[in-house]
Image (cartoon, grey):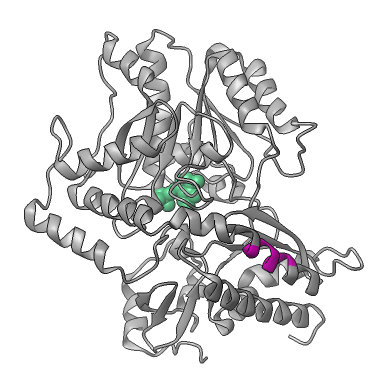
Amino acid sequence: MSLVESSTAQQSRAHRHMVPHFTKGAAWRSNLLGVIERGEGCYVFDSDGNRYLDGLAGLFCTNLGHGRQDLAAAAAKQMEQLGFYPTWGWATPPAIEAAAMIAEVAPDDLDEVFFVSSGSEAVEAALKFSRNYHVARGDEGRYKVISREWSYHGTTLGSLSVTGVPKFRKPFLPMLWDGTRHVRNTYGDTAAELASARAVEDMIVAEGPETVAAVIAEPVQNGRGGLVPPDGYWPELRRICDRYGVLLVADEVICGFGRFGHWFTSERFDVVPDILTFAKGVTSAYQPLGGIVVRRPLVEEVWESEMGMYMHGSTFGGHPVATAVAVATMTAMRDEGVLANVLGNEAGFRSRLDGLADRHRCVKEVRGLGYFYALELMADRHSGVELSSTEAAGLQGGVLAGFLRRAGLLIRPDDRGATMLTIAPPLIADDTVLDDLTDRLARVLTDTEGWLQGDG
Ligand SMILES: Cc1ncc(COP(=O)(O)O)c(C=O)c1O
C-alpha cells in the first residue's frame, strides 16, 4: 500500500483550511495525511482507494459499521418530516421515542434522559446536574468532583477539569475550575485490596463530605489503557457515595451501547449509578448525540424544589434527526443481536490478542474486555526491559502510526501513561474481521520489534 501523496488537491486544501483535532502541525502537513472517503462494514477507503480495517470504530463509536442504509434512511425520513425543533418546553416524536428506549435499557430507576450533542457536553450536563441537585436540596456547599488519574472525560472546560490526563490540562490550568480532585485509578489494584476505591473515600473525607457533589468514573477506563476494575470496585464506589451523600456518575460515553456486551457497562459491573453519560455509539456515530440518564427520584426532587428546574440547555440537545438515528441504531442493535455478538466473540477476541502477546516480546500486557483492548508495549518482555524514553518518544511520535498505515490498520497509538495500542472495532465484527485484525496487528508488532532491534 502506498502512502498518500502530499500533492493531491484535497490534501493541500485541507492543509490550507482545516485545523485538525489533537494533531501536531508537522504531522498534519506530512504525507501521512489521509482523506477517508467512504466506508463499508468494518472497513474504510481513502481517496486513493486504499482499504483500511477500522479497528477503532472511528473513535469508539461507529459500532454498527460503515455504510448503513437503514440509518441513512432514518435520517432522511426525519429531515423530510421535521428537520429541527428544540426541546425547550417542547418535545418531538423521535426525541420521545429515543428517550423511552434508552430509559428501558438503562439499569433500574435510571429513567430520565436529558439530551446534548457530544460526550464532553454529556459530562458537562452530569456535572451541572449534580450541582443543581444539591443546590435544589439546599446543600449549597457541595461543588467538588472527584475523578481519577489518566481519565479522559472530554475537552470543554468543565469536562477538561475532571479529565486526568496532564498534558491535555496543563495549558488550560488557569481556566479550569478548582473543585476537582484526582485520585488513583484501578491500575494494579486487586479485589482483595480495593485500594483505588479507598482512595475515593479518603479524598471525600479529607475534603469534607459536605463539599463534595459527585464522583465520576468510566466503568472501564480508556486513559492508561483498558483498565478493567477489580471485582467489587463499583459496588464499593456505590457504598461510599451513599455513605457521604455524594452522587455517583458513570461516564459511559465509550462503555455504553454495547462496547462491553451490555447496553450499559454499569449493568455488567452490578451497579446503579445516579447518573449515566452516553454519546458516540447511541447513534453508531451517524449523528452527533449525547446525553445523561438520571435516576428518577433525583429529577423529581429537583422538580419539586423551590428551584424547580434543571438550569441547563442547548439548541441542538435532542435534535430530531439525531434522535431518529438513535432509535434506528437501537432497533438495529436489538434486531441484529449486536450485544450477543460481542459477548459470543469476547473470549475468542481475547485469546487472539493473548496469542499475539505470546508471540511478540514487545507486548507487555493485554488489558480489556468485550470489544475494547489495550496492548501495552515494552522493549523486551523476555528480558524484562522497558522502552527507553527515546524509544517511547519515537514510537509515539510517528513510528507506530507509520507501521499501522502500512498494515492498513486503524487503531490508536496511545501515550497516556505508557506506550500502548488501543483496539475497539465495530461491534458487528465477526470471526473473519477479527482474524484480519489479528493478522494486521501481527505485522505491526513484527515491524515494531524490528525497529526496536535497530533494523527499522
Ligand atoms: C469517557 C469519555 N467521556 C467523554 C468523552 C468526550 O466525548 P466527545 O469527544 O464526544 O466530546 C470521551 C471521548 O472520547 C470519552 O471517551
The residue located at (39%, 90%) in the rendering is: 7
> Could you say where residue 190 lies in the image, as x and y percent from the top left?
77, 38
Q: How many numbered marks does the figure carry?
A: 0
Quarter where residue 310 is shown? top left
Quarter where residue 131 is shown? top left
Residue most extreme to the right: 383
The answer to whether 221 appears left or right of 290 in the picture is right
The answer to whether 428 appears left or right of 452 in the picture is left
The residue located at (27%, 8%) in the rendering is: 306
Q: Which residues are magenta?
A: 348-354
Residue 421 seen by the camera: no
Is residue 309 shown above or below 437? above
> Could you say where residue 173 lies in the image, as x and y percent from the top left?
53, 40
Residue most extreme to the left: 81
Which is nearer the eye, 63 or 166? 63
The answer to whether 395 appears left or right of 112 in the picture is right
Is residue 246 shown above or below 73? above
Which is nearer the eye, 172 or 116? 116
Question: Could you tell me what secondary structure mostly forms the magenta stretch?
Answer: helix
Which is nearer the eye, 197 or 65? 65
> Could you say where residue 447 lies in the image, as x and y percent from the top left?
70, 82
Residue 454 seen by the camera: yes
Taking the magenta stretch, the answer to whether it contains residue 397 is no
Task: Indicate the quadrant containing the C terminus: top left, top right, bottom left or bottom right.
Answer: bottom right
> Could you say where residue 54 lies in the image, as x and y percent from the top left?
48, 71
The residue located at (31%, 79%) in the rendering is: 13
